[in-house]
Amino acid sequence: MRKAMSEFRDLMRSVPPLVVSLLFLSIVGMNLLANKSINTGVDWLALDCGILFSWLTFLCMDILTQGYGPRAATMMSVAALGMNLLMALIFFIASRIPGAWGESFVEGSEEILNTALNNTFGGTWFIILGSSIAFLVSAVINNFLNDGIGRRIGRDRGFGGFAVRAYVSTFIAQFADNLVFALLVSKVFFGWSLLQCFTCALTGALLELLFEVFFSPMGYRLTRGLLTGRRTAPQAA
């Protein structure tokens, strides 16, 4: 345990603050925006606004994996999940503090709107638990699959190598994340069918992959900066 803590401290000192901040922010934002569904106009297609942040989470993990190794990336993912749970606790406490949200001042609907906002920020235990389990599963898949592809195709392949590793690992891990959450939460608590679970997982993964494709040049530049200019950091075998 002491060795792991020392390794984590060295990692935190080595990883650029921008990458750490983006990873932590994206996970908190992803789980908060997941409270809002997207009206797709199709009964079997269910999406939520969490996809606006989830691509960034996986891009950060790809950067960390290629810069520091899958074990270090997973350690950072667990730390980010811990930060998300802390923020969820703070949001929950805030939702229980007596008072009124600014958006609740609508004549005749103050109590209803205030309660709705408190419930949104306060969260629901099974959603937080389901999203945490889904993220841990997908983080391990993404990080070690990305590294495994890198070992197979060779480490120094330029942007093409970065893209292959990131796109394949992101799509598979995003699909796993969406599917695990849908099966644990949406099917059990909201009565989704298996078709809805799979179509949500697949279409969500495709949309999130498109975001990462668009922003992958930025991710590649950050990764090259880590590989050429970073200080010594723990590297997973």
Image (cartoon, grey):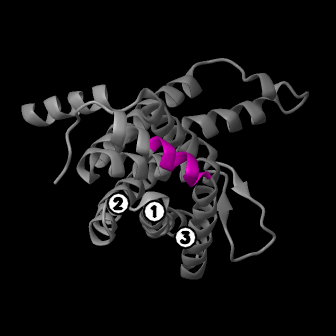
Q: Which residue is mark 3?
A: 201
Q: What is the quadrant of residue 113 in the picture?
A: top right
* Disc on the earlier residue, 3 or 2: 2
> Was residue 218 drawn as part of the magenta stretch in this picture?
yes
Q: Quadrant of the N terminus?
A: top left
Q: Is residue 127 at least partly visible in the picture?
A: no
Q: Which sits earlier in the primary sequence, circle 2 or circle 1? A: 2
In this orientation, which residue lies closer to the viewer: 166 or 194?
166
Q: Quadrant of residue 100?
A: top right
Which structural element holds mark 3?
helix
Element assignment for label 2: helix
Instruction: Judge by depth and name the residue closer to the eye, 111 or 36.
Output: 36
Counting from the top left corner in percent of width and height, residue 184 is at 44, 65
Left or right, 208 with respect to 115, comes to left
Q: Which residues fall within the magenta stretch? A: 215-222
Q: Position of residue 111 (x, y in %)?
A: 76, 30
User: Which labelled disc corresponds to residue 177?
Assistant: 1
Say what amino acid the circle numbered 1 marks. Asp
Mark 1 element type: helix
Q: Measured along the vertical axis of the image, is residue 199 above or below residue 5? A: below
